[in-house]
């Protein structure tokens, strides 16, 4: 598990107690009701602050943004683009 994915999973576990047997790559935390729209805004701000990135509107609309694996890839790509590794 990458540092970014570990951060995302730790946050979701701390806030929402995820099931133990989930597939982190495909688990849709929005569809499953773990994060509502208000919590998602807070989560986005937290990720942007933690990793020194800013999400575009297109990234926020991307359905992969709602899965742990997809969100991890988006954040890692943003970090690499910004040279914040």
Image (cartoon, rainbow, N blue to C red):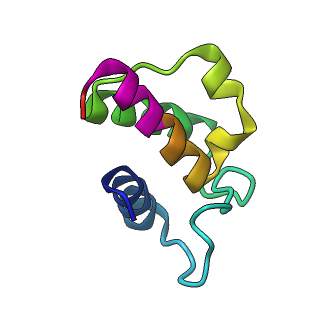
Q: Quadrant of residue 3?
A: bottom left
Q: Quadrant of the N terminus?
A: bottom left
Q: Quadrant of the C terminus?
A: top left
Q: Measuring from the top left, give residue 28's x and y in whole percent.
A: 68, 56
* Apparent side of residue 85 relative to residue 56 in the rendered image (left or right): left
- Residue 75 vertical position relative to residue 31 in the rendered view, above or below: above
Q: Quadrant of residue 24?
A: bottom right
Q: Is residue 21 visible?
A: yes
Q: Residue at x 42, y 39 (%)?
A: 76
The magenta segment is 75-83
Q: Measuring from the top left, give residue 36's x and y in whole percent.
A: 63, 44
User: Could you say which is closer to the camera, residue 70 or residue 12?
Assistant: 70
Is residue 85 found inside the magenta-colored segment of the image?
no
- Residue 6 vertical position relative to residue 19 in the rendered view, above or below: above
- Residue 80 vertical position relative to residue 10 in the rendered view, above or below: above
Is residue 79 found inside the magenta-colored segment of the image?
yes
Q: Residue at x 68, y 61 (%)?
A: 26
Q: Is residue 35 visible?
A: no
């Amino acid at each position: 598990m990458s540092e970014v994915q570990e951060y995302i999973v730790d946050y979701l576990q701390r806030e929402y107690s995820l099931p133990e047997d989930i597939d982190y790559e495909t688990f849709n935390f929005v569809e499953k009701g773990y994060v509502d729209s208000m919590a998602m805004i807070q989560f986005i701000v937290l990720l942007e602050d933690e990793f020194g990135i800013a999400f575009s509107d297109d990234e926020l609309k991307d359905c992969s943004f709602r899965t742990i694996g997809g969100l991890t890839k988006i954040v890692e790509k943003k970090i690499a683009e910004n040279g914040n590794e």
